[in-house]
Image (cartoon, rainbow, N blue to C red):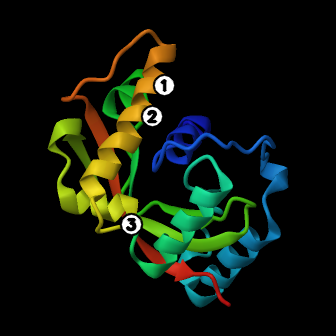
Amino acid sequence: MNRLFLVVCILFFASCKSETKTETTTENDIDQSVYNMWNDFVEANPKFHDDELPESWYFHNNKADANRLAKLTLSGEKNATTTGLYDWYKAAGADLPDIGTKHIVTDFSGKAQAIIEVKHVDTIPFNQMPKDFAAMDMGTQIDPLKKWKKAHWDFFESIMKERGEKPTEDMLIVFERFKVIWPEKK
């Protein structure tokens, strides 16, 4: 899958704040903690010795939300994410996320927080998002569906507007449920 496509989708999906990180990260700029976390995981789980270093990224597009969502992931309150619109995957010729794929979630500064593994991938019409799925994505039980719909509608609307499109209530979203398989060691 196109790394840029995945990163763009994941970074912007949990809220509608606009503070953005101005630095760009290249493969050479990966924080050492990402390598250390993966090496510790592989040492404890030798069957993954031949696996490549997973992609590392943070949720959202600003420091406060990225760090908050990383903490919610570590606590188990956030165990899902909306990865984009099905039509975006189709247009890019990209496969949907694979079950079993691992990612390293970082804080906004790039420090490794957890290794997650994709457990389920669903395509769901926007207007049929279940409340419990929204709660898994947002990491809250307080109005999760209302918060999910607002944050994601605003995001999809802003991206689609740039392309001369408009979101629809029945647009298919790609929803990924995951499990933390290796938390940061304190």
Amino acid, disc 1 = Ile
The front one of 47 and 75 is: 75
Q: Quadrant of residue 151?
A: top left
N-terminal-most mark, 3 or 1: 3
The residue drawn where x is 66% and y is 64% is 107
Q: Which residue is mark 1?
A: 159
Q: Position of residue 1 (x, y in %)?
A: 51, 39
Q: Position of residue 47 (x, y in %)?
A: 53, 80
Report how many numbered discs are placed on residues in the image.
Answer: 3
Q: CA distance from mark 3 to mark 2?
A: 18 Å
Mark 3, other Cα within 10 Å: few <14 / some 14–19 / many ≥20: many
Q: Which residue is mark 2?
A: 155
The front one of 183 and 69 is: 69
Residue 151 makes an appearance in the image: yes
Amino acid, disc 3 = Gly
Cβ–Cβ under 8 Å for marks 3 and 1? no
Cβ–Cβ under 8 Å for marks 2 and 1? yes
- Would residue 22 be found to the left or right of residue 169 on screen? right
Mark 2, other Cα within 10 Å: few <14 / some 14–19 / many ≥20: many
Secondary structure under the numbered disc 2 in the rendered image: helix
The residue drawn where x is 84% and y is 52% is 28
Q: Position of residue 22 (x, y in %)?
A: 78, 40
Q: CA distance from mark 3 to mark 1?
A: 24 Å
The front one of 95 and 51 is: 95
Q: Quadrant of residue 137?
A: bottom left
Q: Which mark is residue 124?
A: none
Q: Which mark is residue 139?
A: 3
The residue drawn where x is 62% and y is 73% is 113
Q: CA distance from mark 2 to mark 1?
A: 6 Å
Q: Position of residue 166 (x, y in %)?
A: 34, 17
N-terminal-most mark, 3 or 2: 3
